[in-house]
């Protein structure tokens, strides 16, 4: 029994030390302090049992501990979840979304009275909520909570650069059939994946594009408003970039807007390079990037098996959680197509509800996934969310900040992700400790930090 106690104490102590080290590196001081206290308690428990062994009291305590630990250790490994339909998979009546109904598109109507009259004639229920939103300052303009004359224009500059890339869309593939003929589908996919990661992507996936992945009509820009989108490419390359967690931890203040805009630029850069690469090899391709989409990145990323849709209505990457940005390249290149995978992240979202409880605009639902457009999926009350964005002058991101999946890709957090993926009991244990170590309701700052950008 004594040897077993020493082994149990050593293993548990090592795991706690890993947590202490990770918390200090991440500057999560509450987690570090509580982990240090747990290490002391662990040392006192197992050290005390070793010190007083083989007394009857020590033997009794050891037997009780092992009687609890053995079933718990077995339970940890059991891979079982109640059978549920995969979130964000289409039903037989799945249909495309009209981009004109998106809040970003509806916000642009403030500058286009004719288009506004046409839209609100068929969507009168959107008129009053949108008018209230239109009266607020735009992102990047003075008058919002976190506006800063020095730093806010940095995000505006990034979005201006993105808008200018709309004029770079290729029309015809470049002729180089010999190069295209040298590559199999697997070789081409490996080249694209390597190219994407070389330029900064944390993940690259491939999927077969279905009609429901595409928007039905354009709506973001006045010059294309209402145009029917006709899908021409059968496959998509999904590009994932990760946002800096240290910047997102300052949400909802200005750093989150700067980091979000930076990663939209990065994902667009990678997507455009991949697009041109495919064209040089003789294939047709188009980049779908921020404010220049013809399709929806989130369902494409889910279909590519890179993650799942979370309660907050955005993509949850299998490693980086919601702390990512996406771009897609649609193409006619002969690429392999993956399928969706169940990482049980949506199962965790069903019990967690941390993003919904912390959302300052109350835009995230607390209930189960509804069905819309032929999908069973979570979606937010976008009018509430966007109204808050305009009021505070950033894209908030507080839901991303509090999500238990928003953690660095370190050994201890990889272990936790594996632990969560096994069964519902593990998930409840993980949620308890996440609430304990990182708070159920972390504080929200009302002003920008002294240092907006990293040193």
Image (tube, grey):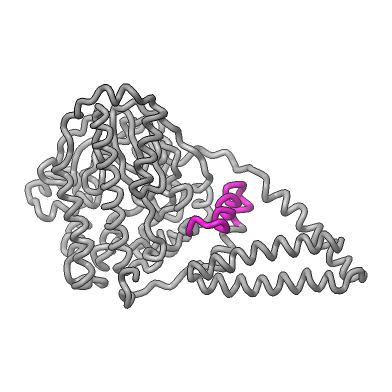
Residue 149 in picture, x, y percent from top left? 18, 72
Q: Main secondary structure of the magenta part?
A: helix
Residue 359 in picture, x, y percent from top left? 39, 63
- Figure disc tally: 0
Q: Is residue 367 left or right of residue 68?
A: left
Residue in front for this viewpoint, 59 or 272? 272
Q: Say if 180 sits above or below 129 in the image.
A: above
Q: Say if 25 sits above or below 298 in the image.
A: below
Q: Say if 294 sits above or below 413 in the image.
A: above
Residue 437 in picture, x, y percent from top left? 55, 68
Tell whether position 421 is magenta.
yes
Q: Residue visible at 48% across and 59% down?
A: 407
Q: Residue furthest bottom?
A: 450
Residue in front for this viewpoint, 41 or 143? 41
The answer, for residue 243, to whether it is visible in the render is yes
Q: Residue visible at 53% across and 73% down?
A: 30
The answer, for residue 215, to whether it is visible in the render is no
Query: Which quadrant of the figure has residue 93?
Result: top left
Tell whether position 266 is magenta.
no
**Segment colored magenta:** 408-428
Q: Residue visible at 25% across and 40% down?
A: 287
Residue in front for this viewpoint, 277 or 95? 277
Q: Residue visible at 36% across and 38% down?
A: 300
């Amino acid at each position: 029994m004594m040897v077993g106690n020493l082994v149990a104490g050593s293993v548990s102590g090592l795991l706690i030390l890993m947590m202490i080290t990770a918390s200090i590196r991440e500057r999560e001081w509450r987690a570090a302090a509580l982990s240090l206290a747990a290490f002391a308690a662990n040392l006192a428990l197992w050290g005390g049992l070793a010190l007083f062994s083989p007394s009857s009291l020590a033997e009794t305590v050891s037997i009780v501990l092992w009687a609890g630990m053995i079933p718990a250790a077995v339970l940890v490994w059991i891979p079982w979840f109640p059978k549920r339909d995969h979130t964000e998979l289409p039903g037989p009546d799945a249909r495309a979304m009209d981009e004109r109904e998106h809040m970003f598109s509806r916000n642009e109507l403030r500058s286009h009275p004719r288009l506004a009259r046409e839209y609100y004639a068929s969507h009168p229920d959107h008129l009053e909520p949108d008018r209230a939103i239109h009266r607020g300052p735009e992102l990047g303009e003075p008058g919002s909570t976190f506006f800063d004359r020095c730093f806010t224009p940095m995000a505006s500059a990034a979005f201006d650069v993105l808008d200018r890339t709309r004029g770079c869309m290729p029309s015809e593939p470049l002729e180089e059939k010999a190069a295209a003929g040298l590559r199999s589908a697997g070789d081409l996919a490996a080249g694209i994946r390597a190219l994407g990661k070389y330029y900064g992507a944390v993940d690259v996936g491939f999927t077969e594009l279905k009609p429901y992945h595409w928007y039905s009509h354009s709506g973001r820009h006045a010059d294309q408003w209402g145009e029917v989108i006709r899908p021409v490419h059968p496959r998509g390359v999904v590009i994932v970039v990760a946002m800096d967690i240290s910047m997102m931890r300052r949400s909802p203040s200005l750093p989150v807007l700067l980091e979000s805009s930076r990663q939209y630029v990065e994902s667009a850069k990678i997507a455009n390079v991949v697009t041109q690469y495919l064209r040089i090899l003789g294939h047709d391709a188009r980049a779908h990037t921020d404010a220049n989409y013809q399709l929806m990145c989130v369902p494409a990323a889910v279909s590519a098996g890179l993650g799942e849709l979370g309660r907050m209505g955005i993509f949850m990457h299998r490693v980086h959680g919601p702390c990512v940005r996406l771009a897609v390249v649609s193409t006619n290149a002969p690429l392999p197509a993956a399928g969706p995978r169940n990482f049980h992240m949506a199962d965790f979202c069903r019990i967690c509800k941390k993003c919904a409880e912390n959302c300052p605009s109350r835009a995230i639902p607390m209930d189960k996934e509804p069905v819309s457009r032929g999908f069973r999926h979570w979606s937010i009350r976008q009018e509430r969310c966007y109204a808050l964005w305009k009021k505070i002058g950033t894209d908030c991101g507080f839901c991303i900040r509090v999500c238990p999946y928003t953690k660095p890709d370190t050994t201890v957090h990889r272990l936790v992700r594996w632990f969560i993926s096994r069964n519902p009991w593990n998930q409840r244990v993980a949620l308890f400790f996440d609430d304990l170590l990182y708070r159920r309701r972390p504080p929200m700052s009302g002003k920008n930090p002294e240092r907006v950008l990293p040193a």
